[in-house]
Image (cartoon, rainbow, N blue to C red):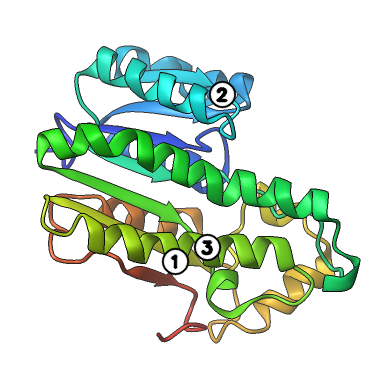
Amino acid sequence: MQEFSGQVALITGAASGIGLAIAEKLLAEGAKTALLDFNEDGLKTAFGAYGDQVLLISIDITDENRVAEIVGQVVGHFGRIDALVNCVGITGATNIKSHEVSSENLHKVFEVNFMSSFYTSKAVLPTMLAQRYGRILHIASIAGKEGNAGMLAYSASKAAVIGMTKVQGKEYAETGITVNALAPAVIRTPLVDAMPDAQVTYMTDKIPMKRCGTLDEAANLAAYIISPKNSFTTGFTFDLSGGRATY
């Protein structure tokens, strides 16, 4: 029997990178999925052949009202939401000192990386509470644990995601809902490919395994975190850092 047969997952940032890999993993395991991304063409290219198993939605994830509207649409279409995976993220400007950071860029990164995860979790939680079951996974980053020099906006926004995960995990611990985060180190994705080489080298050199993580490794761990098997861990940030983070 497929692991996610009969379940419905909502995934943001599903058109590329970790979001795409997780979506493909869940679809292969029998889930029905609502896949959200700003890149409508990317969604259609990657998932257009899945038919009724997917609901593809182009969205500006920083629009709270639109997020709430879409969650209602997904519940109306599939009847439930069992899992939410927040994968959308941007690095913003990098390789710059804090005193040179643009406030405008900082706000933008927080809107995409932190506020969107708040908007989606806020919108799905009432449905999960009514079901007495749910799994929420926020994709954070090792940068949110340790801070990457030259990446103030990204590091701080991911630290905020980790903080929210701890709060939500405790708030809903008695409801059948788990809320966890995943903190990858460098995973070979388009987002990483867009970084300056110096920034990637800085991060990879800190990994004891001396390599990037793979998308398969990220998808496999994410699938466990949001599975029914993971029933006694909540408010926790899972490591995916090749040994860089041991706490």
Residue 213 is at least partly visible in this image: no
Tell me which residue sits at (46%, 39%) in the image: 119
Dot label at residue 163? 1
Quarter of the rendering containing residue 199: bottom right
Can you say whether 97 is above or below 130 in the image? below
Whether residue 154 sits left or right of residue 241 in the image: it is right
Q: Position of residue 163 (x, y in %)?
A: 44, 66
Q: Position of residue 181 (x, y in %)?
A: 39, 61
Dot label at residue 59? 2
Question: Within 10 angstroms of label 2, few (less than 14), some, or many (20 or more) residues?
Answer: some
Name the residue tied to disc 3.
160
Q: Secondary structure at mark 2?
A: loop
Q: Secondary structure at mark 1?
A: helix
The three-letter code of the residue at mark 3 reads Ala
Quarter of the rendering containing residue 25: top left
Distance from disc 2 to disc 3, alpha carbons, whole Å, reads: 23 Å
The three-letter code of the residue at mark 1 reads Gly
Tell me which residue sits at (82%, 72%) in the image: 98
Q: Earlier in the sequence, mark 2 or mark 3?
A: 2
Dot label at residue 91? none
